[in-house]
């Protein structure tokens, strides 16, 4: 399900909305400013579209040219926040967590904000319910005076072995490290300057030399690429003298595997969690998800079965970590399944492959109302467009025409062309490509409202 161009943050794994959308919407009811989003440059239009779908306008959308872990990302967000409000307090959230008890989470955020206003750098410690070896741990120290339920951080502990995890659980002094934080933006920048000056210097240079691109803040590529890669945990939280932890029991999960998703999902009387067109018989304790066709499982026990339009996974719940090995194999083999689904999202809509063969390819295309593809040309292919529903505005050389439902047009090889949707409903069409080379890199762009190269 999670691909390089469509990672799990953008997928509807635990609700009908994406995990990113749920992350933002669960803050409803808190007095917060518009969110600051930090994402990879490649995902900028996905982020923007998913925010638009839920009616949220970001305070800033910051684009990283490369990934450098969470400390540089937090630094960039803090710099953006200070530019908006010198006294800003940051609530730092990953976009792929599940939190089921939102009311308790809100209470914890308010308590953390009070601590942050007093100069503390706060993290949330998750109440452990089993000796997990896949999480880092936080040991709490003395209570913070004047702040009930908050403790100084005694130490952070790396992912432990089973024996240590069991000892941590038995002691009652340890929480799982949630990776969520609250602190004043200026305060975390000061601590970065004290404990990780190279990160602060590079992040500051990348922010100061950032360029505005549409609604995006594009960090300077050279400065950010030179930034050391480190987590905010290592760079600041483990070194500061003012780290505090608020232990919470909020139904938290980082949804790190299919077995974890089975844990947190609703189940039938046989312990099965299903989504999509699924038929089960004699099956127990299984997670079955069908995306594009009917899936049947007969006599299965403790299985994970996930079907998409281009891949099927079948494993046992206790072997799901092997998915990482499969992804590694796909990467080494340069398989497209590691990068994207058959449906590929673009800022103007999406396209999906229907059929392909020697010297031809058929695609289904959706263009959003008011959206337009770039004015472009291909060296190696011609295209036939058949409008299925909606109305297309087509530029073909010097001609501009409207093409309606059940009508078609032909774009000869080497001809400048553009496809637009001038209407108020989505435009759907079938594209038939023919030629000696049909790769997506055979595009020469002359004009593009989305400023792609």
Image (cartoon, helix red, strand yellow):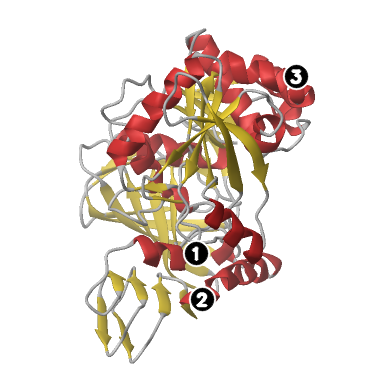
Is residue 399 among what the camera can see? no
Q: Which residue is mark 3?
A: 194
Rendered location of residue 65, percent (x, y)? 65, 35
Q: Are marks 3 and 1 in contact (CB under 8 Å)?
A: no
Is residue 437 among what the camera can see? yes
User: Measured along the vertical axis of the image, is residue 129 above or below residue 88?
Assistant: below
Distance from label 2 to label 3 (Cα)? 43 Å
Viewer-closest of 414 and 65: 65
* Count of number-bearing discs: 3
Q: Which residue is mark 1?
A: 434
Q: Secondary structure at mark 1?
A: strand
Residue farthest top in this picture: 86
Rendered location of residue 370, percent (x, y)? 30, 34
User: Measured along the vertical axis of the image, is residue 3 above or below residue 314?
Assistant: above
Give the mark nearer the N terminus: 2 vs 1. 2
Q: Which residue is mark 2?
A: 318
Label 2 Cα neighbours within 10 Å, binned few <14 / some 14-19 / many ≥20 = few
Q: Secondary structure at mark 3?
A: helix
Which of the two discs, 3 and 1, sits closer to the camera?
Answer: 3
Give the mark nearer the N terminus: 3 vs 1. 3
User: Measured along the vertical axis of the image, is residue 12 above or below residue 41?
Assistant: below
Please tell me the numbered disc located at residue 383: none
x 77%, y 21%: residue: 197
Rendered location of residue 288, percent (x, y)? 35, 74
Viewer-closest of 149 and 201: 149
């Amino acid at each position: 399900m999670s691909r390089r161009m469509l990672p799990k943050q953008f997928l509807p794994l635990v609700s009908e909305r994406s995990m990113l959308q749920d992350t933002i919407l669960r803050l409803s009811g808190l007095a917060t400013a518009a969110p600051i989003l930090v994402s990879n440059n490649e995902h900028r239009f996905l982020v923007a579209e998913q925010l638009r779908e839920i009616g949220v306008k970001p305070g800033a959308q910051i684009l990283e040219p490369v990934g450098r872990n969470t400390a540089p990302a937090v630094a960039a967000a803090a710099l953006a926040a200070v530019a908006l409000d010198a006294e800003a307090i940051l609530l730092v959230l990953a976009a792929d967590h599940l939190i089921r008890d939102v009311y308790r989470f809100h209470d914890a955020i308010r308590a953390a904000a009070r601590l942050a206003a007093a100069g503390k750098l706060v993290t949330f410690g998750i109440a452990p319910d089993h000796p997990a070896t896949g999480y880092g741990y936080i040991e709490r120290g003395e209570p913070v005076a004047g702040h009930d339920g908050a403790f100084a951080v005694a130490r952070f502990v790396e992912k432990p072995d089973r024996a240590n995890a069991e000892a941590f659980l038995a002691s009652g002094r340890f929480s799982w490290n949630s990776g969520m934080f609250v602190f004043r933006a200026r305060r975390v920048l000061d601590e970065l300057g004290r404990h990780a000056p190279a990160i602060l210097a590079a992040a500051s240079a990348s922010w100061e030399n950032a360029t505005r691109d549409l609604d995006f803040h594009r960090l300077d590529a050279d400065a950010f690429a030179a930034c050391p890669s480190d987590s905010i945990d290592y760079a600041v939280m483990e070194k500061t003298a003012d780290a505090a932890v608020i232990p919470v029991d909020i139904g938290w999960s980082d949804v790190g595997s299919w077995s974890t998703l089975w844990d947190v999902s609703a189940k039938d009387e046989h312990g099965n969690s299903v989504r999509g067109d699924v038929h089960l018989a004699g099956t127990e304790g299984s997670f079955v998800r069908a995306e594009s066709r009917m899936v049947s499982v007969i006599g299965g026990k403790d299985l994970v079965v996930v079907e998409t339009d281009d891949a099927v996974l079948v494993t046992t719940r206790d072997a799901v970590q092997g998915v990482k090995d499969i992804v590694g194999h796909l990467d080494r083999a340069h398989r497209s399944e590691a990068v994207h689904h058959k449906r590929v999202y673009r800022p103007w809509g999406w396209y999906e492959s229907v059929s392909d063969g020697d010297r031809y390819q058929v695609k289904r295309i959706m263009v959003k109302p008011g959206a337009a593809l770039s004015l472009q040309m291909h060296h190696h292919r011609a295209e036939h467009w058949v409008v299925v529903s909606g109305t297309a505005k087509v530029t073909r050389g010097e001609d501009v025409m409207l093409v309606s439902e059940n009508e078609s047009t032909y774009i000869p090889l080497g001809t400048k062309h553009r496809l637009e949707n001038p209407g108020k409903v989505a435009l759907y069409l079938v594209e038939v490509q023919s030629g000696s080379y049909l790769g997506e890199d055979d595009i020469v762009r002359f004009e593009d409202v989305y400023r792609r190269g």
